[in-house]
Image (spheres, rainbow, N blue to C red):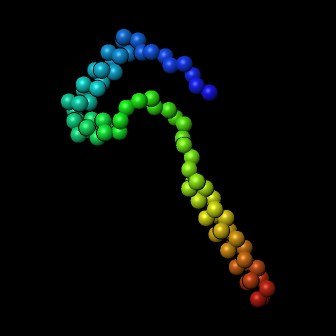
């Protein structure tokens, strides 16, 4: 669900501009690096992909192998 955007006040915009100028003076390489990432609205939403589940699948496979090994060793003894 989208929330309406809240515009920055003049004081907030001035503070952010001052921070940006100070950062540009202190570390221009960082500013160049960050500016390469584009612009636009930033959200905290994460876009999932089909590869996000591989750690869970790997853990399930390891547990299955471990359980199978336990079954084999208990039958041997």
Q: Residue at x 41, y 30 (%)?
A: 40
Q: Is residue 20 left or right of residue 69?
A: left
Q: Residue at x 58, y 25 (%)?
A: 2
The quarter in which the N terminus is drawn is top right
**Residue 71: horizontal and vertical position, in percent?**
76, 79
Residue 46 in the image: above or below residue 16: below
**Residue 7: horizontal and vertical position, in percent?**
45, 15
Kindly indicate the quadrant of the structure image that contains residue 9: top left
**Residue 21: horizontal and vertical position, in percent?**
24, 25
Report the label total: 0
**Residue 57: horizontal and vertical position, in percent?**
63, 62
Kindly indicate the quadrant of the structure image that contains residue 41: top left
Residue 9 in the image: above or below residue 26: above
Q: Which residue is drawn at 54% across and 41% down?
A: 46
Q: Is residue 57 left or right of residue 43?
A: right
Q: In this view, does 51 lie to the left or right of 9?
A: right
């Amino acid at each position: 669900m989208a929330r309406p955007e809240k515009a920055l006040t003049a004081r907030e915009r001035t503070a952010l501009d001052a921070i940006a100028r100070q950062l540009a003076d202190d570390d221009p390489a960082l500013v160049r690096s960050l500016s390469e990432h584009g612009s636009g609205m930033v959200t905290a939403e994460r876009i999932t992909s089909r590869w996000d589940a591989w750690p869970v699948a790997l853990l399930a496979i390891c547990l299955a192998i471990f359980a199978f090994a336990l079954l084999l060793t208990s039958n041997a003894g």
